[in-house]
Every structure is written in C-alpha cells, then in structure tokens.
Image: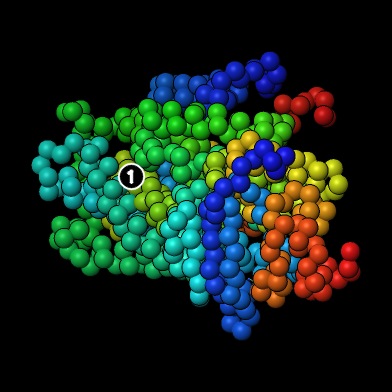
Amino acid sequence: MLYREAGQFKSTYAADSAILPIRQDRIGLALILLVAFVVIPLTATPYLFSAILIPCLILALAALGLNLLTGYAGQLSLGTAAFMAVGAFMSYNFILRIPGIPLLLAFAGGGVMAAAVGIVFGLPSLRIRGFYLAVATLAAQFFILWCLTKVGWFTNYNPSGVITAQPMVILGYAFDTPPEKYLLVLSIVTLMALAAKNMVRGNIGRQWMAIRDMDVAAEVIGIRPMRAKLLAFAVSSFYCGVAGALFAYAYLGTVEPEAYNLDLSFRILFMIIIGGVGTVLGAFLGSAFIVVLPIALSTGVAFLDSTLHLNVPSSVGSNLELMVFGGLIIFFLIVEPHGLARIWQITKEKLRLWPFPY
Amino acid sequence: MTAVRAIGDPVLRLDGVSLAFGGVKALNDISLDVREHEIRAIIGPNGAGKSSLLNVINGVYHPQQGTITFRGKPRHNMDTHETAALGIARTFQNIALFRGMSVLDNIMTGRNLKMKASVLEQAIWFGRARREELANRAKVEEVIDFLEIQHIRKTPVGRLPYGLQKRVELARALAAEPSLLLLDEPMAGMNVEEKQDMCRFVLDVNEQFGTTVVLIEHDMGVVMDISDRVVVLDYGRKIGDGTPDEVRSSKAVIDAYLGVPH
Ligand SMILES: Nc1ncnc2c1ncn2[C@@H]1O[C@H](COP(=O)(O)OP(=O)(O)OP(=O)(O)O)[C@@H](O)[C@H]1O
Ligand SMILES: [Mg+2]
C-alpha cells in the first residue's frame, strides 16, 4: 500500500476542493464505512455494541460539536454536557407531548432547542474570551442542570427524576436491539460528520477560523464577529443536543440530568485535546481513545491481578485511569497540541515522501 | 505612467479629524483628501499617527472629532465591516494573517462578503454553496497568479518567510476586489529584491484595476518613486501635503522629518 499523490493531478477547482483530494484517503474512508456499516453489524457482540461502539460514536458527535466551537471558532466551552441534556430532555418532551411526531424530527427539535440555549449562553462571548468565557459556560452547565432538576415540566413531574426513554420507532420499525441502535446512531453520526466537514471547508468554517486566529483582521475583511460566534454556538450546540438525545435514547435508555454532569463536559473536552483541536477526525480518534482506555486499563489490571496474584485493590484501576488521563492531557497540551489527528497527518506526510527524505 | 492613469475627483475626504488615546493625541485636526486612482503616500516619524490614520479610515478606531466622507457620504466615523462592504481593504503593519490556515484559505476569507449561501446550504454542499465556492476559488486563483504565489498555495501561512507573508496579506486584501486599498508599511523589513517586487505589485494593482492606494512607507526612495501625492504627519499633525517634489522641498517637512536638507 503506497501512500502517494504523484500522478494525481487535479484539473478542476472542484476536484481540488473535494473533501478528500487524495485517492488513497478516499479508498481508506470507503473501507472504514464498509467495515462500519457491513462488517461490524454482522460480527460484533452485543457487549461491543452497547459498551463501546455506541457510546463511542455518540460522544464523538458531541466532541465534534465542541470542536466546531472550540477548535474552529476558538471559543472555549465547559457546558457541552448541559447542551446535550437540553437535547435529550427536549426530545423526550417532544415525543411525549406531540403524539405521532417522527423520532428523527424529535431529535432534530432537541438539537434546535439546544442551539437556542447555546446562543443565549454564547452571548457573553461577544464581550469576554478565554478563561472568563470558560467560566461563563461553566455557569451554563450548572444552571441548565439545576433547571432540569427543579422545573417539573421537563421531567413530566416524575418524582425520581429518572425517566425511561420512549422506544425508538421510525416508520413503524422499532430500533431496540444493539445492532439496530448502532446502525441508527452510525447513520446519524456519519451524515452529521459529513455536514461538519462541509461547513469547515466552506465560507463559514473559514470565518470561524479567522475569528479564532485574528479577530481584528477578520472584522476588517467584513466578517461580523457577533454573527460568526453566535452561529458557532448554535451549530455546536445543535450537534451536542442531537448527541445528548442519542445518549439518552440509544445508549442509556433513560433520560436523567445526572448523566450530563460536569464530568461528561470535561471528558468531551479531553477528547478533542487528545484527538486533535480543530479537526473533524480528531473528535472520533479522541472519543475512541477515551471510551476504550478505561476498559483496556481495567482489563489489563484484572489480567495482571489474576496471573501474578498481586491482590490489587479495586480502587487502583480507577485511580490508574485518572493518572493516565492526567498524564496524557499534559503530554498532548505541551508536546502535540493538535493531538492524535496531527500525529496521523505527520505520519501521512512522511509516508508521502518515504523512502526519500525530500 | 502617471499620464496614462486619469486621476479623478476625491473619493475620500477627512475634515478636522482628531483622535486621542487618553492624553496622547494620535491625530490632531487632520484634513486631507484622496483622489480616485491615485497612489497617496503617508509619511512621518515613528509614532506620528500614520497607522492611526488608516485605522480611522477603515473604522478600527473611531475619532472623537471630524467627519470622514467616502464617495460623497459624510459620516462621523466608519464601521469596520461596513467599510469592507464599501470596498475598502487593507494590510497591517504587523502581519495579521490567520496563522492556523493555509495561504489559499487566508485569501479565500478575503472573499467572504461575496458568498451568500446559508449555513444549511454549506452543510450539504449543494447548489448555491458549491457554485459560490468554485466561482470564488477561480477569482482567488487569479489573485494568486497575479502575485506569483502559486507554489505556496497549500502552505500554512505560519511556515512562510516574512516577505511572502506580507505578499499573502496583500493577496487577501486584493481578493476582495477593493476600490480603495490601504497599505500599512507593505515593504518594511524586506530586502531590496522583495521591495522591488512589492513596488511592482502596487503599481500594477493601481494601473490594471484602477485601485486607489493609500500607502504608509518609511523608504523615501520608494515613496518618491511611486506616489502621486504625499501627506506628512508629525506628532499627529499634518505638516505637509503635495507632490513628492513639493514635500521634499518644504521647509517644515525638512525640519521635522527629513532632518538633512536636500
Ligand atoms: N490602541 C492604542 N492605544 C493607545 N495608544 C495608541 C494606540 N494606537 C496608537 N497609539 C498611540 O498613538 C500614537 C500614534 O501611533 P501610530 O501607531 O498611529 O503611529 P505610526 O505613525 O504608525 O508609527 P510607526 O511608524 O511606529 O508605525 C502613538 O503615540 C501611539 O502610542
Ligand atoms: Mg504604524
């Protein structure tokens, strides 16, 4: 397998601005999609679907949403999980209160409501930035969860606050087994990732990056910072909202505020730091990494425990997880701020030239 | 060369413009005009208020006093994205490129006002969004050819040497097809060859597209060579205004700025 673009000349700007201009990348993506849509559904175990693949895809979607806002538009947010919660609770209420509403429309409605809330909490970004903006979004995290807990309407006055999610039915077909849920999630995530890729390679993506890199220069060429930033909050929160609805309906099976705590916001932030800030691929790499790492660690610890009879106390596993996470975050922030996606890109550049150094 | 271009009526006029930062009077009662198709230079010692003047013209700073008349419409101050829409583009003294983006993307942002497709259309990359992207890409390629930067099209701007970064910044400004181009020390820090290239580009832009140019420059040779009229600032005041020859022989200018009589 040679990774070369020699001989692949682009004769039109359309070909040159395609999503993946290099043929090997297109073949690679086609293979990944083939595996994801055909091979995995035929071979994977229910455990793999429910514990790894489904959460991985859903959190990748949320990380993608955050990456549009933070990585592309440069606005740091710690309220990701709260925007997800808005999506989940509003989808729940749409299905509950509008009989016969199509499921996908309810999810999209949840996303739109999250986008509206995102715009409101994005308003401070017009005045403040960086650390102070992060604190403002932190306020969103606490305020929104507080509202969802205290205002009975959202939970339909359910005394426990934990609601069972309605079954997922599209055109009379129920998606209730793990492979079915997986395929539904995969389809939604694939389409939304494609849309994200289109946005970031187009005019709006360039506007976001321009605001992120140098706002005065962006204004001088006619970009309106207010519009671009609020649009970033809206689109990002829409992605998070849909991810939140999927998290409740396809993964947890329940709709509950506690699932969307600050911890989840931070996990999603770590995903884009490790995966790669400002890339679409990074959201997926980061999510896979953070979902799989704890499982790999605990399996590893259990294996050592049983073979070497170390009698490792059960707390070691989770502490080890925190330590490895902490170490990795610091490593990526200092050594490779563009994350795994950048490492992948460098490898590709090397491959393109290999075996000649120039 | 000057004979070929027909210099027209004033397109931009400043009347009694004053701008202060706290106690510092960056601009003090400045009046001047810029005529259609001319190359107008602004010179003056460091801290004279040259950059501030450009910032007032394109709305980055709002003056406390005075009026600015652009294409017959007087106003108290300009608004940045409004000036962009009116066809005023500029480059900065300290390079203000978008560092995380490629040369091509930087120049494409210069055309953001020409693209009208909604976010939804862009997300599905269909119809108007796709058409606009390709049409504007073709325009940007013209600018790239004009400034001879084809070879660095895909390079992240951060990796370019200083001289080329300045050229990319000019490209981004030209991509907007401005009628008035403001250049803040486009040749500062360049070697002789790069300066010559830049001079040639400025003259070509002016000649081929009829773009009016306002240029800040420290290199007197360059200023005397390419400009039609020169404004001299010192401590925020205008101390000279006229053709290069008039300015060169003005007593006030020699005392304040040139130091040595010619
Ligand atoms: N944003 C600002 N805040 C405070 N003071 C400023 C600001 N911008 C400019 N000044 C002051 O206004 C005066 C004029 O500055 P300006 O940058 O316009 O000078 P200049 O002629 O461009 O100088 P140079 O040749 O060094 O670029 C200086 O005293 C400067 O310190
Ligand atoms: Mg200056």
Residue B252 position within the rendered picture, expressed as x and y whole percent measured from the top left:
77, 73
Q: At 29% from the left edge and 67% from the top edge, which residue is drawn?
A: A146
| Type of amino acid at the residue the image marks with label 1 | Val
- Residue B76 shows in the view: yes
Kindly indicate the quadrant of the structure image that contains residue A192: top left
Residue found at the far left of this picture:
A99
Residue for badge 1: A242
Chain to which mark 1 belongs: A
Residue found at the far top of this picture:
A7
- In the picture, measured across the screen, residue B100 lies left or right of residue B191, that is left
Q: Which is more toward the observer, B242 or A245?
A: B242
- Residue B106 shows in the view: no
Residue B54 position within the rendered picture, expressed as x and y whole percent measured from the top left:
60, 61
Q: At 72% from the left edge and 26% from the top edge, which residue is drawn?
A: A352
| Residue A309 in the image: above or below residue B107 | below
**In what quadrant of the picture does the N terminus of chain B appear?**
top right
- In the picture, measured across the screen, residue A48 lies left or right of residue A6, that is left
- In the picture, measured across the screen, residue B17 lies left or right of residue B116, that is right
Residue found at the far bottom of this picture:
B23
Q: Which is more toward the observer, A116 or B114?
A: B114
Kindly indicate the quadrant of the structure image that contains residue B46: bottom right
Q: Which is more toward the observer, A258 or A282?
A: A282
CA neighbours of label 1 inside 10 A, class few (<14), some (14 to 19), many (20+): many
Q: At 36% from the left edge and 35% from the top edge, which residue is drawn?
A: B121
Kindly indicate the quadrant of the structure image that contains residue A121: bottom left
